[in-house]
Image (cartoon, helix red, strand yellow):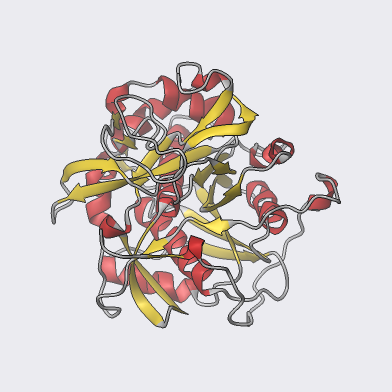
């Protein structure tokens, strides 16, 4: 494996003062839901970056390759007349700190790959938010690749004031309550903590709002499990190494060494995991997987300097899978809307449907071992590296259309 830099292993620091105020919304104070004597941990990025070969042209997987590899280009509705592209849906992406040039960076990405610019809005959780290089690259990855997979969906980027969990959860609260949002993507996490279950309600559908699904990356350092991926209200996405040819034809896939998984120390086993044998009493993660190895990573454009570089990066990490699985859910919600059905709720609809649908809807990843303590190996059926596998998107979406 080529050497890579992981921002999870580097302390996050403020680099540039934010310059632009775009929108400010209020959120429920986090202090209403936690013990004031408790110090919540800061979140870490699930982001891995290859050293640059060139920063002037794209390197890494392209949208057309990925859409073809996972069969997104074979998703249609209304008797094959409507493309599955997320039209009519809004994906909310929650990240920390400000990305001052995300709109123009997305336009550069779209121009490189022949994509139309989406409806993008940015919600800042404070009037002045600093910029952080690692989080800016994460934001570019999340926004660009949610758009690449669901190119007709609207995107709302919610920028938390900092990487503290209290600030990020306030941003999640705003994201899930924003009008029209049907999916929330979170590419960050922290080690589990004893009171985490008291915060799981942040990942539920708000009263008076259409159903919302919440998706989170599982982490990039192997076991043990991290939160919020460990929340039973969240779809947790682990990581793989995906091999494709130049046209995007699927060749093979194995579990990525960094994919975080394991058995939660605090979250009780949800009913939708009744057939999961790794634990009789506690929640296990991940639920599903997606390409994450930076060696098979994604082309990302970011104009904010990161490690002395700006421009094109090749980026991996389970954070790449969270926005793309969120895009898959948005596409399923699009199809449900065409059939007169509502959007999906994570715990009551999405996760039970995924765990009970045919295993043929997924690539069952049977090789690859994760790092961490303890080591876990991918195996037939559910495992603690890749969950139930990576999607045949066309089959998964069609099955989600039937969910009641």
Residue at 80% in and 50% down = 38
Using the image as rendered, state which of residue 324 and residue 41 is in the foreground: 41
Instruction: Answer left or right for 250 relative to 159.
Output: left
Residue at 36% in and 47% down = 85
Picture coordinates of residue 232 (x, y %)? 59, 32
Q: Is residue 401 visible?
A: no
Picture coordinates of residue 161 (x, y %)? 68, 66
Picture coordinates of residue 343 (x, y %)? 53, 35
Instruction: Answer left or right for 140 relative to 78.
Output: right
Residue at 51% in and 37% down = 235
Using the image as rendered, state which of residue 180 and residue 370 is in the foreground: 370
- Relative to residue 362, is residue 259 depicted above or below? below
Instruction: Answer left or right for 20 relative to 100.
Output: right
Instruction: Quadrant for residue 253, please give it.
Output: top left
- Relative to residue 274, is residue 45 depicted above or below? below
Picture coordinates of residue 86 (x, y %)? 42, 47
- Relative to residue 295, is residue 75 depicted above or below? above
């Amino acid at each position: 494996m080529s050497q890579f830099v992981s921002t999870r292993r580097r302390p996050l620091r403020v680099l540039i003062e934010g310059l632009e105020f775009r929108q400010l919304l209020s959120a429920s104070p986090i202090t209403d839901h936690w013990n004031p004597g408790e110090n919540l941990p800061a979140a870490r990025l699930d982001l891995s970056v290859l050293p640059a070969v060139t920063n002037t042209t794209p390197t890494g997987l392209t949208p057309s390759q990925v859409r073809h590899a996972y069969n997104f280009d074979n998703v249609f509705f209304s008797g094959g007349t409507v493309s599955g592209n997320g039209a009519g849906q809004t994906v909310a992406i929650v990240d920390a700190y400000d990305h001052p040039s995300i709109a123009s960076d997305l336009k550069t990405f779209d121009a490189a790959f022949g994509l139309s610019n989406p409806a993008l809005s940015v919600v800042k959780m404070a009037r002045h938010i600093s910029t952080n290089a690692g989080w800016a690259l994460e934001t570019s990855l999340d926004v660009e690749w949610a758009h690449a997979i669901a190119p007709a969906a609207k995107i709302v980027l919610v920028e938390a004031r900092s990487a503290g969990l209290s600030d990020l959860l306030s941003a999640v609260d705003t994201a899930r309550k924003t009008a029209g949002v049907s999916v929330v993507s979170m590419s960050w996490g922290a080690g589990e903590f004893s009171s985490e279950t008291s915060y799981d309600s942040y990942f539920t559908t708000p009263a008076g709002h259409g159903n919302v699904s919440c998706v989170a990356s599982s982490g990039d350092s192997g076991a043990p499990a991290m939160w919020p991926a460990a929340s039973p209200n969240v779809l947790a996405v682990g990581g793989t190494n995906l091999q494709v040819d130049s046209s995007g034809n699927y060749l093979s896939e194995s579990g990525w060494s960094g994919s975080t998984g394991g058995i939660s120390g605090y979250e009780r086993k949800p009913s939708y995991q009744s057939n999961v044998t790794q634990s009789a009493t506690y929640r296990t993660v991940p639920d599903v997987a997606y390409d994450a190895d930076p060696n098979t990573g994604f082309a990302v454009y970011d104009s904010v300097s990161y490690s002395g570089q700006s421009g094109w990066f090749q980026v991996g990490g389970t954070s790449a899978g969270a926005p793309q699985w969120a895009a898959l859910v948005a596409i399923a919600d699009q199809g449900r809307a065409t059939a007169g059905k509502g959007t999906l709720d994570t715990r009551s609809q999405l996760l039970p449907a995924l765990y009970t649908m045919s295993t043929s809807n997924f690539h069952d990843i049977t090789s690859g071992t994760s790092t961490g303590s303890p080591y876990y190996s991918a195996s037939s059926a559910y495992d603690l590296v890749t969950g139930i596998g990576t999607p045949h998107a066309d089959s998964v979406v069609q099955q989600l259309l039937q969910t009641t």
